Image: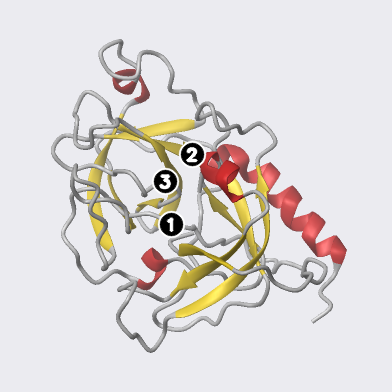
Amino acid sequence: KHCSAHATEIPPAPPALSLPAPPTAPELAIKASPSPGRAAPAPQPPHSHGAESRSRPCPAAAGSHGGWDGKIFQVLLGAHSLTKPEPHKRLYRVRAQIPHPGSNIHNNKDDLLLLQLEEKAELNEHVQVLPFQREDRDVAADTVCKVAGWGTTSHSGHRPDELHSLERPVISRDVCNHRTRHDHTITEKMMCTDSRKKDTCKGDSGGPLVCNGVAEGVVTAGSRVCGNYKKPAIYTRIAPYVAWIDSVMASAAGEGDTR
């Protein structure tokens, strides 16, 4: 399931080199193949677009990885529009995708996947690294967070050309788990935001949820009917997976950088 980036399938590429060593800084880019449901298009801060400071793993939602098996993808960084020429827009090949070992396509458990680019991403004012939360604590209810991407913006399935952003308040796990909402299916590794009138939607999975400048989660799922207040948007929290993320990055470092 799914860094704020847009992934596209491309023809098979030559065999990849060994995985490069990741940098020591704790920041990762958050991948977004997504976009929020009913938000107005607006220029985003650089980190909203997603970026990698190196060719290293970045968090994304894992559930959709089932459709990626055996395919070659690219990640689009520095984009606001998917089709219009933009000076800082660039595609990067995905070298490796590493789903969390506990993830599967049938539920939202451990819904996280890491993507590794084949080369170092070029950082500039439009493409920057987004820090992620390393302290395992819940975001306080009513904290207003931002999510961004290119998902559907209407029930007809329309997908926008321009990146959309949306600000939504966090709701407590107890409220999200109410029997009239997600009925005790939201674990401590998940979090929710209010979905009344404004919501994430199809195609937003993997988008970063940014609270106070830090990525706290990635979009995982919600109601089939976007904007249904009885079905709050669900996110995979990043902090509970820091040890796994660090382990994957350490493994990549062990492979060495041959470029």
Q: Residues within 10 Å of mark 1 (few under 14, many from 20)?
A: many
Residue 209 at x, y = what percent? Answer: 38, 49
Please tell me whether mark 1 or mark 2 is closer to you in this view. 1
Q: Is residue 81 left or right of residue 72?
A: left
Please name whichever residue, 252 or 37, is drawn nearer the observer in this view of the structure.
Answer: 37
Residue 169 sits in which quadrant?
Answer: top left
Q: Which of pointers 2 and 3 lies earlier in the amino acid sequence?
A: 3
- Residue farthest to the top, as pictured: 179
* Residue bearing the label numbered 1: 33
Q: Is residue 238 visible?
A: no
* Residue bearing the label numbered 3: 205
- Residue farthest to the bottom, as pictured: 87
* Label drawn at residue 237: 2
Residue 116 at x, y = what percent? Answer: 65, 62
**Secondary element at image label 3:** loop
| Residue at 61 percent of width and 40 percent of height | 241
Tell me if label 2 and label 3 are in contact, CB under 8 Å: no
Please name whichever residue, 220 or 47, is drawn nearer the observer in this view of the structure.
Answer: 220
Q: Is residue 79 left or right of residue 167?
A: right
Residue 237 at x, y = what percent? Answer: 49, 39
Tell me if label 3 and label 1 are in contact, CB under 8 Å: yes
Q: Is residue 204 above or below residue 25?
A: above
Indicate the amino acid at tag 3: Ser
Q: Is residue 48 above or below residue 99?
A: below
Whole-Å distance between the Cαs marked 3 and 1? 7 Å
Q: Is residue 185 left or right of residue 17?
A: left
Q: Quadrant of the C terminus?
A: bottom right
